[in-house]
Image (spheres, rainbow, N blue to C red):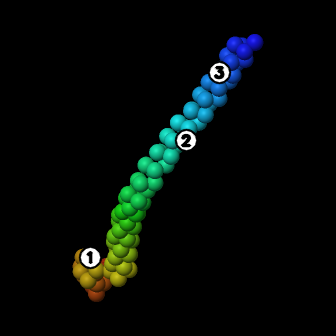
């Protein structure tokens, strides 16, 4: 009677041991992954801020160029490219003949 009881206890112990061992391995792997991610956060944060700064600088330059273009168009240029306008002539025209 002792032999089957020992066998059952051994099987139950193996099943519980496998479950506990796999849970420990998952927890250990998760802790290692957490530590790796935790170490990479400052580097990723620094990179993200550099990208944001680059976009902000480009947007500011484009905004300044647009502001300058609008201001230039509003003021107009000093160069008169059309030239003088023709003045009306003072000559008398003959009445049309029929």
Q: Which residue is mark 3?
A: 10
Q: Nearer the viewer, residue 80 or 7?
A: 7
Q: Which residue lies at the image location 53% right of the left edge and 36% below the top edge?
A: 25
Q: Which residue is mark 2?
A: 27
Residue at the right extreme of this rendering:
1
* Residue 96: % across, % down: 35, 73
The CA distance from mark 3 to mark 1 is 105 Å
Q: Secondary structure at mark 1?
A: loop
Tell me: residue 32, above or below residue 91.
above
Which is closer to the viewer, label 3 or label 2? 3
For label 2, the crowd category at 10 Å Cα-Cα, with few meaning under 14, some 14 to 19 and many 20 or more, is: few
For label 1, the crowd category at 10 Å Cα-Cα, with few meaning under 14, some 14 to 19 and many 20 or more, is: few
- Taking 1 as reference, is 78 left or right? left
Q: Which residue lies at the image location 72% right of the left edge and 15% below the top edge?
A: 2
Residues at discs 1 and 2 in contact (Cβ within 8 Å): no
* Residue 14: % across, % down: 62, 24
Q: Nearer the viewer, residue 89 or 2?
A: 2
* Residue 51: % across, % down: 38, 60
Q: Which residue is mark 1?
A: 82
Residues at discs 3 and 1 in contact (Cβ within 8 Å): no
Q: Choose top left, top right, bottom left or bottom right for residue 20.
A: top right
The dot on residue 59 is none
């Amino acid at each position: 009677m002792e032999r089957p009881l020992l066998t059952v206890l051994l099987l139950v112990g193996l099943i519980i041991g496998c479950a506990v061992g796999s849970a420990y391995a998952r927890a250990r792997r998760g802790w290692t992954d957490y530590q790796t991610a935790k170490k990479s956060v400052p580097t990723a944060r620094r990179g993200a801020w550099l990208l944001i700064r680059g976009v902000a600088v480009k947007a500011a330059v484009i905004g300044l160029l647009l502001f300058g273009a609008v201001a230039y168009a509003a003021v107009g240029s000093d160069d008169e490219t059309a030239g003088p306008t023709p003045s009306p002539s003072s000559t008398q025209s003959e009445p049309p003949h029929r």
